[in-house]
Amino acid sequence: MATSETKAHDGHEVKGPATYLVEAVVAISVMLLGCVVIYGSRELGAGWTSDGPGSGYFPFYIGLIMTIAGAGILFQALFSRKGRNTTVFVDGEQIKRVLSVLVPAGIYVFAVEFIGLYVASFIYIILFMVILGKFSWLKSLIAAFCVNALFFLMFEVWFKVPLYKGEYDLLSSLGY
C-alpha cells in the first residue's frame, strides 16, 4: 500500500496511508455491500407482486444506490480532476485515539453476549469514564448505575420490553 508523507504542524514528518487509497478501499467496500444487498433482495423477491412491492423491492434499490454511490466515490478518489489526494489519511497518534475507543467498544459488544446488556453497559461506562474520561471511580459508579437503572426501569418495567440479559443472566435475581 502506498504511503504518503506530510509535514505536521510542529514540522516533523508524518507517515501513513494516502487519503485517496483509503477512499478507494471504502468505496469498494460500499460497492460490495451494495451488491450483497442486491443479491439478498433478489432472493427475497425484488419485483412488484399482485398486492404491491415484494419484500426485497426497497432493499434492492437501496443496494443499487449504494453500489452506484460507491462507484462514484471510487472514480472520484482515483481519477479526480484535482488529482489524487496524497495527504496522509491518519497518523500514528490519531489511530491510537481511534483504537482507544474502538477496541473497548468491540469488547463491550462481545461481552453483551455473555453477561447481558445491563451488566456489560455498567462495566463499560465505568471503565470508559475512569480510563478515558479521567473521572473518579465514585462518579463513574454513580453515573453507570443511574444510566442502567433508568434504562432498566424504562424498558423492563414501564414498556415491558425485556432487553438481552446474556447467556449467564447475572440479573436473574431481580425477577426480570
Image (cartoon, helix red, strand yellow):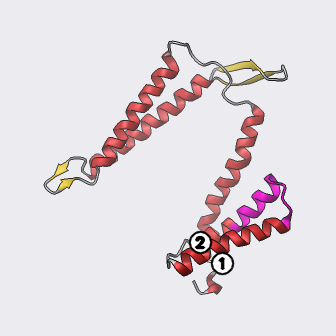
Numbered mark located on residue 170 in the image? 1
Q: Secondary structure at mark 2?
A: loop
User: How many numbered tags mark residues here?
Assistant: 2
* Front residue of 139 and 171: 139
Above-or-below relation of 33 to 111: above
| Residue 151 lies in the magenta stretch | no
Question: Where's residue 68, x and y in %?
Answer: 38, 31
Residue carrying label 2: 166
Asked if labels 1 and 2 touch by Cβ distance under 8 angstroms, the answer is: yes
Report which quarter residue 64 is drawn in: top left
Magenta range is 122-137
Residue 104 image point, x, y percent: 70, 54
In this rendered view, identify the residue nearer to me: 168 or 160: 160
Residue at the image point whose x is 31% and y is 48% from the top: 58
Residue under the image location 66 percent in, 54 percent down: 105
Depth check, front residue: 65 or 104? 65
User: In the picture provided, is 63 more to the left or to the right than 85?
Assistant: left
Q: Is residue 175 above or below residue 87?
A: below
- Name the element at disc 1: loop
The quadrant of the rendering that contains the N terminus is top right
- Mark 1 Cα within 10 Å, few/some/many (few <14, many 20+)? some
- Residue in the image at 76% along x and 33% along y: 92
Separation of marks 2 and 1 at Cα, in angstroms: 8 Å
Q: Amino acid at mark 1?
A: Leu
Three-letter amino acid code at the position of disc 2: Gly
Q: Position of residue 174 (x, y in %)?
A: 63, 85
